[in-house]
Every structure is written in structure tokens, then in C-alpha cells.
Amino acid sequence: MRPAGEPRVRVFNPQLQRDGWESPHTIVEVVTEDMPFLVDSLAVVLGDSRLPIQLMIHPVLRIARDGAGFIVHVPQARVSARDVVAATNGYSGDAFPWLKRRVMPFDAYQTVSEPMPAERLRQLLPGDRTYIDWNFNVDWMRRAPDDPTRIVFGGLTGGRNQDLRQMAERLHVRLLRIFPELTGLRFDNIWTGKCGGTLDLYPHIGRHEGIHYAVGYCFAGVPMGTLFGQKLARRILGGKGGDSAFDRPLPSSPFYWGNPWFVPHAINWLSRHDR
Ligand SMILES: Cc1cc2nc3c(=O)[nH]c(=O)nc-3n(C[C@H](O)[C@H](O)[C@H](O)COP(=O)(O)OP(=O)(O)OC[C@H]3O[C@@H](n4cnc5c(N)ncnc54)[C@H](O)[C@@H]3O)c2cc1C
């Protein structure tokens, strides 16, 4: 098992006797925490080293049964696998139609501020931890772990807006509600991504038609995703500790087929209780 925060990288030239297959190409395998621009960054590094990329296995397009295992279809290739894990959460798309009907994607927004005096930020957020307010529609914040002069501030979960500048302005208003003294502080960056919710508002871990899944973290993706990743690894390796109280039927609804149009309305309804 890979300890958290320690990427595993293997570079090898496959040999039939040792690896069970061969190829004229060098293989680079990377297992690491998910992060933005991971695929693009790897491509840039290889490009900078003037190493042409023959095939990058991402994304999965289709998964088919193959005896006791699976054939995973990726662009330009098919890969055999004994086990498959769908950890696609709010991004569960057409490759995982069963999950798509059960996991509702919704957007979240996050910003990082320009630098401010570290001591001033320490007075506002004294602990090196994430703070969450008591709203239904939560805001969250912390000192940036790699730069204690910047505040990382997120919220507006479930809101749908293509204009990130507008979302940054709305987040700024929410930040000032908590810290009015930060009036002049500007955000340097804003970004968005998809979270996943389920119809019973519980995270779920399980197996459907032989494919393991861990999805639907309902606002607690970082702690629950980390835990479920470990649980899935234990299940696949056959060790102890793979059981979970969250392994329960993942509900669907005849009214939900993958278009979460109602999420912004539900969030607006919840936000009314915050005023
Ligand atoms: C802006 C923002 C702020 C957040 N803040 C917090 C927070 O403070 N605390 C917290 O607990 N949670 C937070 N979350 C939620 C948390 O990030 C998610 O719940 C968590 O990332 C889920 O992790 P995951 O690995 O299961 O899924 P994801 O991180 O969603 O990863 C799913 C991956 O599957 C890949 N994928 C999808 N389909 C395919 C395919 N067909 N083939 C190959 N790959 C595929 C996607 O590219 C993606 O990389 C936040 C989310 C956002 C967007």
C-alpha cells in the first residue's frame, strides 16, 4: 500500500518473462493523490525531456467483463484488469451509467487570496486547520498550507455559474461577512470542481457487477474519500479492515437520470435558513 503523500513512480521496459508482456516502448506508471493538471503536468515534463508520448491511459471509456476480470477500454488501447475501482464521484459519466444515475454532481468554488502579513492572518485563523461556519450552505477556510500569508476560502457549493469572476465577487462578500476587516483583500485565484451527493445524503462504498466503487461524499470528500480509498485497497488485497458501515444499497430514483437541475434550487432553499 502507498503511504499518503508519497507518489509511486515506476519506469520500465516490459519484458515477456518478467512482466508477462512486452512492448518496444518505455512505460511510466504513476500512482499519486489526485490533483489538478496531473495529466497535463506529466505530459509537459515528458515533453520538456523530448520524450514523445505514445499512449496516455486516461480516461476510461468503457469497461467490459472478461472471464473473472475486466477489459478496460481507454483511447487507443484495451487493458485487462483483475479489479476495477470507480472512484469518479461527481464526475461519474457515461463510462459508469449505473453510478451516473445515483451520484449527483454539484459544483463547489474555492479561492486563494493575495498575500497578507502572516501575523495578521494568524490572529484571524490561529490554528493550522480548516474552519467551517455553521451555515447550512457552508463556507470553509484555512491558511494555505504551503504559504501562511494567504487565506484559502471556499463555498457557494451547488451554485451554478460559468463566470468565475462573479463567483469570486460573491465569495468575497461571504468572506467579509465573517472578517469585515479584510475589505481590501483581493483573491489571486479562483477555481471550481465537482462534488458528488447521493439521494440518501450518505457516502457509499460497495461493488456493482464486480466493479468496486467509493462515491457520494456529500460535503466530506477529503476525509471520507481518504478512508474509503484505504478500505477499497484492503478489500481488493483481501486483507482485514475492508468492512464499512457505508456499504449499504446505493439508492436511485425513477425521477433522476443524471441531470441535477434541482441542486441550485435546493441549495437556495437551504441558504434561506442562513439569513
Ligand atoms: C472547490 C472544491 C472545494 C472542496 N473543498 C472540500 C473541503 O474543504 N473538504 C472536503 O471534505 N471536501 C471538499 N471538496 C470535495 C472533495 O474535493 C471531493 O469530495 C473529493 O475530491 C472526492 O474525491 P474523489 O477522489 O473520490 O473524486 P474526485 O476528486 O472527484 O476525482 C474523480 C476523478 O475521476 C476521474 N474520472 C472521471 N471519469 C473518468 C473516466 N471515465 N476515466 C478516468 N478517470 C475518470 C476524474 O477525472 C477525477 O480525477 C471540495 C470540492 C471542490 C470542487
Image (tube, rainbow, N blue to C red):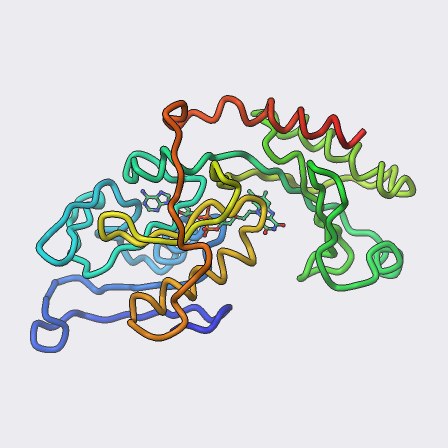
Describe residue 122's horizontal placement relative to residue 89 as left or right.
right
- Image x and y of residue 14, in percent: 16, 69
Describe residue 77's horizontal placement relative to residue 84 as left or right.
left
Residue pictured at 30% horizontal, 52% vertical = 207
Residue pictured at 74% horizontal, 39% vertical = 135
Describe residue 231's horizontal placement relative to residue 69 as left or right.
right
Image quarter in which the N terminus is found = bottom left
Q: In this rendering, is residue 171 above or below 119?
A: above
- Image x and y of residue 183, in percent: 88, 37
Q: Nearer the viewer, residue 107 or 117?
A: 107
Residue pictured at 57% horizontal, 50% vertical = 220
Figure quadrant of residue 145: bottom right
Tag count in the figure? 0
Residue reaching furthest to the right: 181
Image quarter in which the C terminus is found = top right
Q: Nearer the viewer, residue 253 or 24?
A: 253
Q: In this rendering, is residue 213 above or below 231?
A: above
- Image x and y of residue 24, in percent: 12, 63
Residue pictured at 30% horizontal, 38% vertical = 98
- Image x and y of residue 210, in percent: 23, 53
